[in-house]
Structures are given as structure tokens and as C-alpha cells.
């Protein structure tokens, strides 16, 4: 996707958001069992295998906490586009309150789930002595008073940097030239990141189009067309993705908007049940999807 420097200031239509969450892994390398496996398998290198113990094997309490973090990350990824390798994401300003409210809800859920887990943690250690058998080592488990530090959930918003953000303490003679160089570099870097961000949105649309093409293809069995199985979300997710893509297109990229619009029109023209019941409707919809993919050489 090739675009020029954003046609209006990103700092007025978007913000940057970061989510930092950590959860105790409850995993521990078992060196003794690892050595046994390597020896029993006659491996030439001691690094041929690694046996990690699941310190809470058979328990689901920690998985619930991990799932909350996973849901929060997936939600944020859906509502934003990547900005930097460090994990910053760019969010349309119009969605700031909505995303802040949802992340706050995830944070509350995280805290309210971690707290009872920490309370029952000592009893879980006792139970794991039997679950792990000879692999149980009490020293593998953090002290109860240290366990809370293994969990965290924080998020923050910050403005998108602009070329005017530079403050440089240099002599007056060099100031103008230095600012010009740094402003140009920031504008180039911003354009590169915007290109990457918009490409991320385009990739989401293309991936769903390809998924639709695959699921709407009818296999011929004994001379008769047989539809492939698909869920209602094939259409529901397409419409939801189109809504998100409209908001995420913060630089009004025309190609991105055209692909989004055409996918939306395809998805609005059918229902999952109609696609299942009618070969003709299914085949016509697949052809429209394939034509859209071919149109832009996806």
C-alpha cells in the first residue's frame, strides 16, 4: 500500500495505546527429569530435550486468568493497528472512550480473578504434591507473599508524536538545520508506520475474503455439489470487520475503503442460512468474492 505523508495530523485523529499484562506461568524446568529423558533416548547432546513441569497440573484457576489477558489483547488488536515494534498500537480518537471502558472492565475482571486465586494458592501447593508425584518440589513455587508480584495488568494512552515534538538544546546556528533534519526523519518514519498500519487493516480484509472464498466453494461429490461447512460468523464477522476497518482507516486510503465497501456489500446481500440452502446463491457470492480478490491481485 503506497501513500504519501498523512493528509491531516494523526495527533488530532488518533492516540497511541499500550497494554502490559503479566501472569505467573506456573512452569519450571525439571533438570533431573530432563537428564533422564536425554539419557534414556541416547541423545548425544544434553540440550536435545527440555522437560518443563506444569506446577498446577490438573487445575484450571490460572488458565482463567490467562484467558482474561488473552481476551484483552485480542480485543485491543481488533480495535487498533500496530504502531511500533515495542507493542504500541494506534487507536482512532473516536474509539478512545469505548476502548478505555472495555480495558478498564478487563482490568477489573483480572484483579477480581487474581485475588481469589492468590487466596487459595497455599492449598493448591498442598494438592500438587500428589498431582506431580516425584516431580514435586516445594521450592519451585513462589512464596505466597511474593505471588502477587507475578501478576499485573496496566494500560495507558499517549499522544501520537509529531515533528514539532522535538526539543533540542543546541546553538542557534545549528538549531534550524537540526530541526529540519529531525522533522523530515520523523515525517518519513510516521509515513512508514501509517503505511504498515493501513496494510494491517487491508490484510485483515483480504484474509477474510480468502476464508469466504474457501468456505463457499462447493465440492463435487458423485456429480452433485456439496457445500463445505461454515459458521454464521463467516458473514457476521465480515460485517463487523467492515465496521472496524471504516474506523481504522484514519488516513482515508481510497483503496482500503473500496475493498472494505465491496466486502460489506457482498456480506449484506446474503445470510448464512441462505448460503447453506441455495447452491446458486452460494456460488454467486463466491464468484463476487473471487472477483474482488482478482480485481486487486490479492
Image (tube, grey):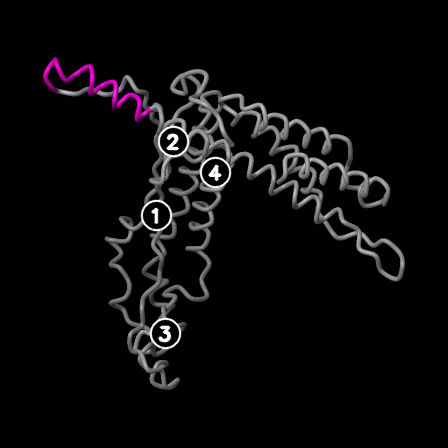
The residue wearing badge 1 is: 22
Which is nearer the eye, 254 or 78?
254
Q: Earlier in the sequence, mark 1 or mark 4?
A: 1
Q: Is residue 87 above or below residue 40?
A: above
Question: How many numbered circles are shown?
Answer: 4
Q: Earlier in the sequence, mark 3 or mark 2?
A: 2
The residue wearing badge 4 is: 77
Position of residue 129 measured from the top left corner of the image (x, y, whole percent): 35, 72
Quadrant housing the C terminus: top right
Q: Nearer the viewer, mark 2 or mark 1?
A: 2
Q: Residues within 10 Å of mark 4 (few under 14, many from 20)?
A: some
The residue wearing badge 2 is: 17
Q: CA distance from mark 3 to mark 4?
A: 34 Å
Give the label on residue 188, or none.
none
Q: Is residue 178 magenta?
A: yes
Give the label on residue 49, or none.
3
Which is nearer the eye, 150 or 155?
155
The furthest residue to the left: 171
Q: CA distance from mark 3 to mark 2?
A: 39 Å
Dot 3: what SS? loop
- Image side of residue 215 versus residue 43, left or right: right
The stretch of residues the image draws in magenta is 170-186
Amino acid at each position: 500500500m503506497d501513500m504519501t505523508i498523512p493528509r491531516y495530523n494523526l495527533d488530532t485523529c488518533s492516540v497511541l495505546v499500550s497494554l502490559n499484562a503479566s501472569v505467573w506461568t506456573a512452569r519450571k524446568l525439571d533438570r533431573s527429569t530432563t537428564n533422564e529423558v536425554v539419557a534414556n533416548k541416547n541423545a548425544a547432546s544434553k540440550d536435545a530435550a527440555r522437560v518443563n513441569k506444569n506446577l498446577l497440573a490438573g487445575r484450571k484457576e490460572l488458565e482463567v486468568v490467562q484467558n482474561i489477558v488473552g481476551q484483552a489483547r485480542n480485543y485491543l488488536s481488533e480495535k487498533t493497528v500496530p504502531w511500533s515494534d515495542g507493542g504500541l498500537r494506534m487507536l482512532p480518537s473516536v474509539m478512545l472512550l469505548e476502548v478505555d471502558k472495555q480495558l478498564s472492565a478487563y482490568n477489573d475482571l483480572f484483579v477480581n480473578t487474581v485475588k481469589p486465586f492468590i487466596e487459595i494458592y497455599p492449598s493448591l501447593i498442598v494438592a500438587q504434591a500428589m498431582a506431580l508425584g516425584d516431580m514435586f518440589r516445594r521450592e519451585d513455587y513462589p512464596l505466597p507473599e511474593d505471588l502477587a508480584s507475578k501478576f499485573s495488568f496496566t494500560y495507558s494512552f499517549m499522544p501520537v508524536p509529531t515533528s514539532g515534538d522535538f526539543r533540542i538544546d543546541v546553538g542557534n546556528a545549528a538549531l534550524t538545520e537540526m530541526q529540519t533534519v529531525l522533522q523530515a526523519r520523523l515525517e518519513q518514519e510516521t509515513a512508514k508506520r501509517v503505511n504498515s498500519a493501513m496494510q494491517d487493516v487491508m490484510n485483515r480484509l483480504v484474509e477474510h475474503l480468502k476464508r469466504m472464498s474457501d468456505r463457499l466453494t462447493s465440492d463435487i461429490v458423485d456429480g452433485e455439489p456439496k457445500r463445505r461447512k461454515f459458521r454464521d460468523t463467516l458473514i457476521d464477522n465480515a460485517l463487523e470487520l467492515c465496521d472496524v476497518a471504516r474506523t481504522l482507516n484514519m488516513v482515508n486510503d481510497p483503496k482500503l475503503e473500496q475493498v472494505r465497501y465491496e466486502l460489506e456489500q457482498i456480506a449484506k446481500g446474503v445470510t448464512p442460512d441462505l448460503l447453506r440452502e441455495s447452491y446458486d446463491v452460494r456460488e454467486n457470492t463466491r464468484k463476487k468474492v473471487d472477483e474482488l480478490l482478482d480485481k486487486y491481485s490479492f
